[in-house]
Amino acid sequence: MCGIAGIFHAENPKPVDPARVVRMCDALAHRGPDGAGVWTDHGVGLGHRRLSIIDLAGSPQPMHSPDGRAVIVFNGEIYNFRALRAELEQAGFTFRTSGDTEVILAAWQKWGPDCLSRLDGMFAFAIFDLATRRLFLARDRFGVKPLFLAHLSDGSIAFASELKGLLAHPLLRRRVNPQAIEAYMAWGYVPDSHSILAGVEKLPAGHFLLLEQGKPPARPQRWWDISFTERERGSEADLSAQLVHLLREGVRSRMVADVPLGAFLSGGVDSSGVVALMAEASASPVQTCSIGFDVAAYDETSYARQVAAKFGADHAERIVATDDFSAIDQLAEMFDEPFADASALPTWRVCQLARERVTVALSGDGADEAFAGYRRQVFHHHEERARSVLPAGLRAPLFGALGRAWPKADWAPRPLRAKATLLALAESGEEGYARGLSVTLPGARAALYSDSFAASLAGFRAEDELIALMRGAPGRSGLDRAQYADLTFWMPGDILTKVDRTSMAVSLEAREPLLDHRLVEFAARLPERMRVKGSVGKHLLKKSLERYLPHDILYRPKQGFVTPIAEWLRGPLAGAARSIASGSLAQTGFFNPKAIAGLAEAHIAGRADHSRTLWQLLMLEKSLGQLGVSA
């Protein structure tokens, strides 16, 4: 696992100052503390920071191909590199190292951009071909590894694993992108379709970019997509057997490392399943780690302990105080862009604990997206059934009126919180799902914006991107389209960003075996009844894991990392909540200070729960302060 950076002059090649590339890489030192390297040629410079995982003594980067024609910098892991190496050796290629980096170089030379479909792994890399003067940038299928791009005033294109790598370039303008603010206020993160800085882009997941000197910059091209258009046939037992085989392959392929390896263990279905399969494949105890909280309502360590004991894991846990809010400034620096998923705090803490014992940790991320494990997906599945029997002309006035009249009862048991469901049923499936995913709804956002900021959006509404994505999704049903949106929009922007930044902040490599692309492609072909059964999501996955895990682990209510931000913002962070209305965020002119003040006072007094929106605003203020941006 590493950090990469580079500079490329396309239309008018100019010399690249190696010192600039060094500064960009130094900003990524946390991603690769074990080594560094820079290479420059006419109009191009590539830099690398290395975290040694495989072939510890070899594989320095930037790496040249044996014939000297191509140079690569690479962040990630290729899990099938040994099989690919054998195939390439049959084709006449020779290798000087025993790692995966040189295999990517050879695959590029053999197949060009088509090499990507042969790579099983997580990656973002850059290859410069000296013969054709072309730069090839690529990102893995799901966007596990990030890649930021910026078009600079001197005509060059700079790239880096994190935004902070680009911030080290003196020509990068630090000007806010208003659409990114709107997207962030909708989702709680800046999705891959935007960047907080104008002029900065993210290479989308499953895309590559091929640039050639002497030609105008090209646009990214999609090289992989997930499809929900086909359906697997067979009995539940047959499909379960296929699923277990794919699970084993995904886990075992990600256990290859020349450094200590372990796993995150929350005690939930997904991480417990990964640990069970790791134990099955390992002759020695699996190293596991968990984070707990000093308040029972937020603590899951007893379940993690139960799973660890069942599989003889070498388990470590740490209890974190629920007043662990002192790290907010560190989180803002870690993510660069504003990021309001409060589970980032405990995720960072579990990464810190893991790094004390191992260098690589397997996680359970991806299963909820692939197998329909989120409550919102199950609700949407049933809402779509209701929509199919009730015409829109009846639904819109009936459920719209009921939804508007129904009280917003955040304090009530879930079955009584019908307002969101009624409003969703009044809309199309795509609009309803976008509403369910939004942290702060369009009307609430509009009430917070200043008139000038609202005008700068020129009609842009964040939800429209997700709605368009779902309507164009390769799927048969509303559940298909919801899962497609989660896999291609939510997961790279939120879940994978969270895990990448928090793990890389402590120089830990996190691997996601449940995002093996063959496993996810299989999951996308499952009949809906194998994904959702009654009120239970991940049906076939849970049934398949019954041979490994006890019933109370598989079928207990989903919890996840919970952070008590509502209590913080009424207690120790109440002052911080109040200060947003008069602090640096208010000075940007983006927001209406009186509206923010009213929001804060209503929350602190307990009249409403505005914790998620206040947390968004607080993290936005911290991030803009870290970036030192202008409007």
Image (cartoon, grey):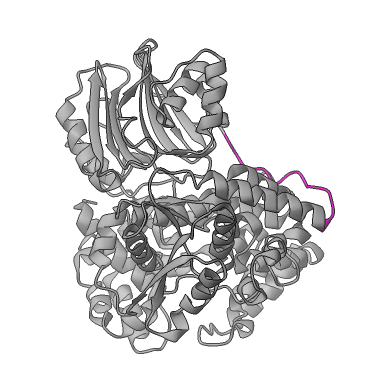
| Residue 618 makes an appearance in the image | yes
Residue 313 belongs to magenta span:
no
Q: Could you tell me residue 42's position as x and y percent?
A: 24, 15
Find residue 86 and report its image quarter.
Answer: top right
**Point 33% across, 24% down: residue:** 63
Q: Is residue 227 magenta?
A: yes
Residues 266 and 579: in front is 266
Residue 207 image offset from top left, x and y in percent: 50, 34
- Given residues 12 and 528, the one toward you in this image is 528
Which quadrant of the figure contains the N terminus? top left
Question: Magenta stretch?
Answer: 224-236
Give the left or right position of residue 594, taking residue 248 as reference. left
In terms of image quadrants, where is residue 588?
bottom left
Whether 305 is drawn above or below 630: the answer is below
User: Where does the image place residue 184, in percent across and percent down from the top left?
Assistant: 40, 58
Instruction: Name the dominant secondary structure of the magenta segment.
Output: loop
Residue 576's image quarter? bottom left
Residue depicted at 20% across the width and 23% down the height:
16
Q: Work out whether residue 123 or residue 135 is closer to the camera in this orientation and state it.
A: 123
Q: Is residue 457 visible?
A: no
- Residue 213: image location, x then y, percent: 34, 16
- Give the residue drawn at x 41%, y 76%: 292
The vertical placement of 566 against 248, above or below, is below
Count of marks overlaid on the render: 0
Name the side, left or right, on which 142 lies relative to 450. Answer: right
